[in-house]
Amino acid sequence: MQKLVIALLLLACFASPVSADCAWVLWREIGLGDQPGLFNAALPNTTWKISDPAYSTEQQCRSALTSELQAIKKEFRTRQKGYDVLELIGTILIVTKPGEDKQEFHLHCYPASLDPRPR
């Protein structure tokens, strides 16, 4: 159901004659846990963070998303020793270290009118 709502909101943004005025927001979904799976019930410790400010276009948001992924990878590969970083689908990072809970970072660009957090 949530995916349907997201799809309809995205469609409304693109189909609108004033879609140029649609602001975009970079959301960071961060999960922590020791179970397999991407942001499912096995990872109950999921938090959401929002970028500030919003971006004027989807392209600007996606550019910021790419930069943020690079910054996270750099942090764990150079400053935080002993971590393995796996990139999935271009918007998901899984960070692991033996003996510690894994961390998952999933970045999203959505229209500012959309709040993707589960209710």
Image (cartoon, grey):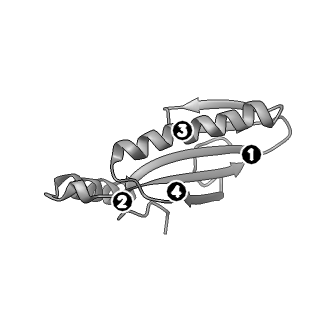
Classed neighbour count for the residue bearing mark 4: other residues with Cα under 10 Å, few (<14), some (14–19), many (≥20): some
Going from the N terminus, do you reach mark 3 or mark 4 first?
4
Q: Nearer the viewer, mark 4 or mark 1?
A: 4
* Residue picked out by circle 4: 51
Q: Residue drawn 43% across and 64% down? A: 115
- Identity, as a three-letter code, of the amino acid under mark 3: Ser
Please, which residue is most extreme toward the bottom here?
A: 119
The disc at residue 67 is 3
Q: Residue drawn 21% across and 55% down? A: 19
> Marks 4 and 1, Cα distance to the nearest angstrom?
27 Å
* Residue picked out by circle 2: 1
* Residue picked out by circle 1: 34
> Marks 3 and 2, Cα distance to the nearest angstrom?
31 Å
Q: Are marks 1 and 2 in contact (CB under 8 Å)?
A: no
Q: Please, what secondary structure does the residue beneath circle 4 have?
A: loop
> Marks 3 and 4, Cα distance to the nearest angstrom?
12 Å
